Image (tube, rainbow, N blue to C red):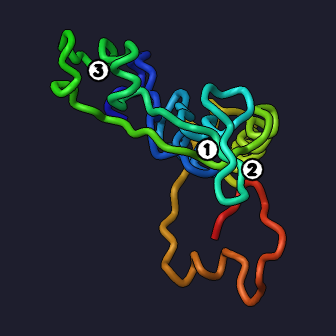
Amino acid sequence: EAIKGSGVPIIADGGIRYTGDIPKAIAAGASCVMLGSLLAGTKESPGETIIFEGRKFKSYRGMGSVEAMNKGSKDRYFQDVEDDIKKLVPEGIVGRVPYKGELVESIHQFLGGLKAGMGYCGTANVDELRDQGKFVQLTASGIRESHPHNIQITKEAPNYSP
């Protein structure tokens, strides 16, 4: 509400972990979302494909990591150090993320989550969701009840983790 009508866009940068987080960010006022590490495991993302303990992963280097800043992203973080890497102050990490297949498959899931969120709010487009989206508070019991229970999941869904 603080910037409503100012024309200044809000970018949700961080915290998007599940497909349902995108409509929540927009209902909270975001103009767009940054997906960063959510796209890191896709075939098209930079990084090496790795097999570790029988599972497929992609290497991931956050833009705020020492390695990325050493390769040139330090300007983005206003890190003005010439040759002394010890003076860099990292804001990111290097690691591996589960391989997720082709980007189009992930985008399909994100769009499905956005459409579902718009449907729950009775809105037909993103602008309506931003203007009319409402939040309700769930109790711990309500959250438990809204998730699958009394069943052991045998086939994972791409957009769900218990």
In terms of sequence position, does the residue under pointer 2 or pointer 1 come before the other?
1
Q: What residue do we see at 42% from left, 21% from top?
A: 5
Q: Nearer the viewer, residue 82 or 26?
A: 82
With respect to residue 159, does 86 lie above or below?
above
Q: Is residue 131 visible?
A: no
* Residue at screen point 74% across, 32% down: 43
Residue 152, given in percent of the width and then of the height, sits at: 77, 83
Q: Residue 23 got which mark?
A: 1
Q: Residue at x 57, y 49 (%)?
A: 21
Q: Marks 2 and 1, how far apart in space? A: 8 Å
Residue that badge 2 annotates: 116
Q: Residue at x 46, y 35 (%)?
A: 12
Q: Position of residue 89 (x, y in %)?
A: 21, 30
Q: CA distance from mark 1 to mark 3?
A: 29 Å
Amino acid type, residue under disc 2 in the picture: Ala
Kindly identify the amino acid type of the residue bearing the numbered disc 3. Tyr
Which of label 1 and label 3 is nearer to you? 3
**Lower sequence index among marks 1 and 3:** 1
Quadrant of residue 87 within the rendered picture: top left
Whether residue 12 is visible to the viewer of this picture, yes or no, is yes
Establish if 161 lies above or below 95. Answer: below
Q: Alpha-carbon distance for marks 3 and 2?
A: 36 Å
Which residue type carries mark 1? Pro
Q: Quadrant of the N terminus?
A: top left
Task: Give the residue number, with chain letter if any, for mark 3.
Answer: 77
Q: Mark 3 or mark 2: which comes first in sequence?
A: 3
Q: Quadrant of the C terminus?
A: bottom right
**Mark 2 Cα-neighbour bin, 10 Å: few <14, some 14–19, many ≥20:** some
Q: Is residue 133 left or right of residue 74?
A: right
**Rendering coords of residue 23 (x, y %):** 61, 44
User: Under tag 1, what secondary structure?
Assistant: helix
